[in-house]
Image (tube, helix red, strand yellow):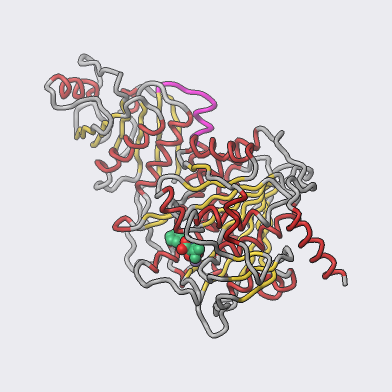
Amino acid sequence: MNFEFQKLSLSHAMTASVDALVVLWPGHVLPDAKAVEPVSRLLAQAIAHGDFELKAGAVLSLYSQPGMATRHVVVSCSADNQPGQIRSAMQAAWGAVKASKIKRLGVHVVGDVSAQGLQMALSTLADASYSYTTTLSKPKARTLKNVRISASHDSAELRQAVVHAQALVAGVELAKEWANRPANHATPTHLAQAAKTIASGRNFKCEVLGPKEVAKLGMGAFMAVAQGAAEPLRFIVMRYNGGAASQAPVVLVGKGITFDTGGISIKPAPEMDEMKYDMGGAASVLGVFKALGELKPKINVVGLIPATENMPDGLAVKPGDVVTSMSGQTIEILNTDAEGRLVLCDALTYAERFKPQAVIDIATLTGACVIALGAVRSGLFSSDDTLASQLQQAGEYSGDVCWRMPLDDDYAEGLKSRFADVANVAGRAAGSVTAAKFLQRFTKSFAWAHLDIAGTAWRSGAAKGATGRPVALLLQYLLSNAQAPGVQKNAALPKVADQSVQKVKSKARAVKQS
Ligand code: BES
Ligand code: MN
Ligand code: ZN
């Protein structure tokens, strides 16, 4: 979608040649009954007759009035013009105009609006008007292509927000597209091809590793998940280098389980189709890279995607099997359905080589996170307070919100194993936290955060579909980080010396050398 910003008065906005116009009207601005343009007059009339109240959620449709260049004008009350209210107002407005075949839509915001508010209006509009079509034989494609957004004031910040919104929407829609595709249309190989396409421009690199290379790296945990699948695994390494070579990159690691049957610990049949979304983390990484390509910020970002199906098979990994991860730590796989952490742990170890300023993994990791936080906030786990608060703030700003969860060491008790260094599952209690505690063992040498998006990456039920989250959160984090690149960590030194892990590592090194 293409967004354009203009500084316009309401009466000028009404003379623009668009197919429909949405006017976001704040609650405290009373319309002028004597205005020359018709919208204020009609609105004032409706209010005077008690037919309309300027309250959040209120929508008034006006059609073919003299003085309106566009047939259809929808006034939607945006209460205090804060981003949350703008979001609801835009959703309601889209509900009122969506029946018409709109190619060009005008959006005019009355009163003061922030850059954040403009971005919200546009991303909400894109979200509401999106529809998936790829595997339909007679696709009804979205007609809306151009959005002209206007406000009565102008600033570099507002214009910047519109540029950001356009890139954000491209990224979100790419993430939705890949997450929505059925697993037979989104195999690890397909994801790798998508990554190559996104990373074909200047400043990008993309390398795709297959089973042989992954075996050579010693990614025993990742390989264990993939060994039951006929589709070959892919380990995707994307690089965006917009910053100086000396600038440490942020590494994004996306869980790329293209279908999660649970493996031998097989899942029950109802809703198993939704496990095609188990690569939502990977899709969000692809989406972020798409947006980076459009915005070209001066930062360095690495994207890592361990991609495979999780299938039951004669060769599949079995409960009780012990495997050796790339870090050297051995893992007892007590439940083959806890596969996300297995593919992620090896990708996290791989991330060390980039000497990153931060590593963020994104994963549809646990049903327990859905129970804890529902579909509203993603679970945020981090061993680094600065990184955690940057991500939290990015979430609040973009409306793609998350909530910090604990990582007390006591939660790791249940992961103890008599047959390996660690088990891949603990009990049912605090399942999203014990999953994060498992991952944390592989993150000792960098600032790390984990986003559990099991509840937020897709919607179930009648409106089933990918949400494109948390592309907005991640992009916001990267862009604000790029403006303040003073937060780099000394990545070379392990922060918290966890003796057991350090010992395992030196043992692993000793083995490799011998
Ligand atoms: N992909 C699932 C997590 C999931 C479940 C996401 C439901 C969204 C909705 C993950 O691989 C998984 O199966 N996790 C298990 C872990 C358990 C075996 C410890 C779970 O959450 O049940
Ligand atoms: Mn699983
Ligand atoms: Zn899974």
Rendered image quadrant of residue 124 = top left
Horizontal side of 113 relative to 26 (left or right) equals right
Q: Residue at x 58, y 57 (%)?
A: 254
Residue 91, percent from left and from top = 32, 40
Which quadrant is home to the C terminus?
A: bottom right
Picture coordinates of residue 205, whole percent (x, y) = 69, 57
Q: Is residue 159 magenta?
A: yes
| Residue 167 as seen in the image, left or right of residue 14 | right
Main SS, magenta residues: helix
The image position of residue 293, as x and y in percent, is 60, 48
Please tell me whether residue 293 is drawn above or below residue 321 in the rendered image.
above
Q: Nearer the viewer, residue 74 or 235?
A: 235
- The image shows residue 129, relative to residue 502, as above or below, that is above
Q: Is residue 358 magenta?
A: no
Q: Percent position (x, y) of residue 178?
A: 48, 60
Q: Quadrant of residue 21?
A: top left
Seen from the viewer's position, the closer of residues 444 and 11 is 444
In the image: residue 298, left or right of residue 405: right
**Res 141 seen here:** yes
Residues in magenta? 152-162
Q: Residue at x 52, y 82 (%)?
A: 313
Q: Is residue 293 visible?
A: no
Residue at image point 20% right, 25% down = 53
